[in-house]
Image (cartoon, helix red, strand yellow):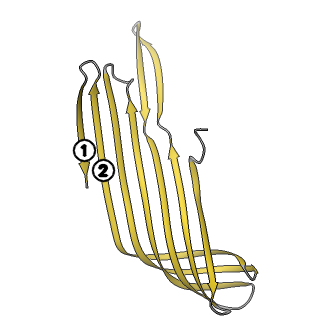
């Protein structure tokens, strides 16, 4: 099935070790994925008695995100529902990819386009949230985080290839940052 997990809003998992009634250490990870396949649309029309064929080629897209984190949390009360605050560290990585493979819009020409960017970050965060502890070992929570990036890495790569299929000659352009 080509639509399997094309848009996956995210998944997170965490484990929390309660140090005392109001303090805890939490470790967790988050995953996110999104994709869109390349789309080609063909439109045929008659202009002045001549058939005109037009192709619209839209790029394909893939996105993947991964994050690891560790936090120290302080609950503001011992009630089942309690606000909390905390601080932590995080590491995240994400990659975006765009691509086009076009061998139909221009006769005897094949176009291949790729673009990638990668981000790697390390930082600290402040946390403010609310937790509903429904069991000693299980709870639901919602929180806001404020992030400060200590290390950021970004890379970019672009590749464009044009092949003349009649002469079998190829031109390639690559750019990296």
Residue name at image x 75 percent, y 83 percent: 136
- The answer for how far apart the CA atoms under marks 1 and 2 are is 7 Å
Residue name at image x 56 percent, y 46 percent: 6
In the picture, measured across the screen, residue 88 lies left or right of residue 155, that is: right
Residue 38: x and y in percent read 47, 36
Residue name at image x 42 percent, y 18 percent: 53
Residue 134: x and y in percent read 77, 78
The residue at the far top in this view is 49
Image quadrant in which the C terminus is located: bottom left
Q: Which residue is mark 2?
A: 157
Crowd rating for badge 1 (residues with CA inside 10 Å; few <14, some 14–19, many 20+): few
In the picture, measured across the screen, residue 110 lies left or right of residue 92, that is: left
Q: Secondary structure at mark 2?
A: strand
Kindly indicate the quadrant of the structure image that contains residue 19.
bottom right
**What is the number of the mark on residue 18?**
none
Q: Is residue 93 above or below residue 73?
A: above
**What is the number of the mark on residue 174?**
1
Residue 27: x and y in percent read 56, 77
Observer-nearest of 147 and 123: 123
Image quadrant in which the N terminus is located: top right
Residue 132: x and y in percent read 72, 79
Asked if the residue under mark 2 is in contact with the one under mark 1, i.e. CB atoms within 8 Å, the reply is yes
């Amino acid at each position: 099935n080509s639509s399997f997990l094309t848009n996956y809003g995210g998944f997170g998992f965490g484990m929390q070790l309660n140090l005392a009634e109001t303090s805890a250490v939490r470790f967790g990870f988050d995953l996110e994925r999104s994709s869109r396949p390349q789309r080609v649309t063909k439109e045929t029309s008659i202009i002045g008695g001549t058939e005109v064929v037009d192709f619209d080629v839209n790029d394909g897209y893939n996105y993947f995100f991964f994050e690891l984190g560790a936090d120290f949390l302080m609950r503001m009360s011992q009630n089942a529902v309690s606000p909390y605050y905390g601080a932590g560290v995080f590491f995240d990585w994400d990659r975006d990819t765009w691509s086009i493979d076009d061998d139909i819009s221009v006769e005897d020409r094949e176009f291949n386009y790729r673009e990638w960017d990668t981000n790697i970050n390390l930082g600290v965060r402040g946390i403010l949230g609310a937790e509903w502890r429904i069991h000693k070992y299980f709870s639901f929570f919602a929180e806001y985080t404020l992030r400060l990036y200590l290390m950021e890495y970004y890379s970019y790569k672009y590749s464009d290839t044009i092949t003349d299929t009649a002469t079998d000659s190829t031109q390639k352009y690559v750019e990296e940052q």
